[in-house]
Amino acid sequence: MSESEVNLSASQTAVQQLKSHICQHIIGQEVLVERMLIAILADGHILVEGAPGLAKTRAINVLSKGIEADFHRVQFTPDLLPSDLTGTDIYRPQQGTFEFQKGPLFHNLVLADEINRAPAKVQAALLEAMAERQITVGAASYPLPELFMVMATQNPLEQEGTYPLPEAQLDRFLLHIHIDYPKAQHEKEILTLARAEARGDATQQEGINKITQQTLFNARKEVLDVYMSDELEDYLLQLVLATREPAAYGEDIAGWLQYGASPRASIALDRCARAKAWLQQRDFVTPEDIQDIAFDVLRHRLILSYEAEAEGITADRFIAELIARVAVP
């Protein structure tokens, strides 16, 4: 057992307390909670897909109340304008000048609800904010806060009146998470929690010591220092490279993909595997860390061929085949 498993750093202790606090309020969605924390530690954005009522909005709200950060929710609709996100110049007649009024994107944690309902020009404004960490209005550019995370949600059921996200925007998301319905025993706990909250005697959010942003920045540095062996780094790269040349791992999967994952996927897989190991209080990465997070990192970066889609092949099925075929060191 390594020393770091016995003596947790101050950042690890704080993040573990935050995780247990969120799990008290978000029951049965442990994967979503872990992935949200991984995204914050790896300094990325997440796209969550799941049916309505699965606590997607609630999860980021609870997360924001455990951190010294401000939170804003934006409901995306077909009539939304870019200025509704970024802000706009407002004329002040008293001074005879224009003054920039900041929009919701200048918060630390932003929930973009039903992101695929907004038209392309709004998605483009969000893309600049996510990619460049800045917003351009007119001739001026404004930097976003250092702690900045977008959690976007989309509903897989309603496809009428939606604008599919372009590949460039999908690639900007660190993780694409699928969440499912909770199990029966979890749903019973959810009912108990809902009744307690309705009575007003549920555990109040104020009971947690909020994590400072500096603690999170320290945690990010610790994540980057998590050890990954050269053999494991080669394995990680082989997984990503296999999406570009799948024929090397079997003729049957050679025709499943049109396009594979970009180098951004390699960077994301590296950061997320380290963050997952750090969250589990280890100072080294294992092959299981890479395999577990590979689905969420890769599923939105792969473009399946028409033949694969016709056969009912999914991105998850392809990733599972790759993990089974690429040799583990």
Image (cartoon, rainbow, N blue to C red):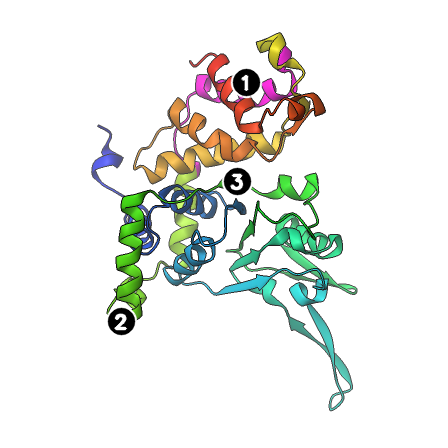
* Quadrant position of residue 280: top left
Badge 3 is on which residue?
Answer: 175
Q: Nearer the viewer, residue 136 or 230?
A: 136
Mark 3 or mark 2: whose residue is earlier in sequence: 3
Q: Nearer the viewer, residue 190 or 295?
A: 190
Q: Mark 1 and 3 residues: CB-CB less than 8 Å, in contact?
A: no
Whether residue 164 is situated above or below residue 274 in the rendered picture: below
Judged from the image, the secondary structure of the residue bearing numbered disc 3 is: strand
Part of the protein shown in magenta: 224-247
Whether residue 317 is situated above or below residue 96 in the rendered picture: above
**Given the current orientation, which residue lies at the most extreme bottom position?**
94
Foreground mark, 3 or 2, reads 2
Foreground mark, 2 or 1, reads 2
What numbered label is drawn on residue 238?
A: 1
Q: Is residue 190 left or right of residue 93?
A: left
Q: Nearer the viewer, residue 67 or 303?
A: 303
Q: CA distance from mark 2 to mark 1?
A: 54 Å
Badge 2 is on which residue?
Answer: 199
The number of discs equals 3
Foreground mark, 1 or 3, reads 3
Q: Percent x, y for residue 70?
A: 47, 65
Judged from the image, the secondary structure of the residue bearing numbered disc 2 is: helix
Regarding residue 9, the answer to whether it shows in the image is no
Q: Is residue 21 left or right of residue 101?
A: left
Can residue 230 be found in the magenta stretch?
Answer: yes
Mark 1 or mark 3: whose residue is earlier in sequence: 3
Q: Amino acid at mark 1?
A: Gln
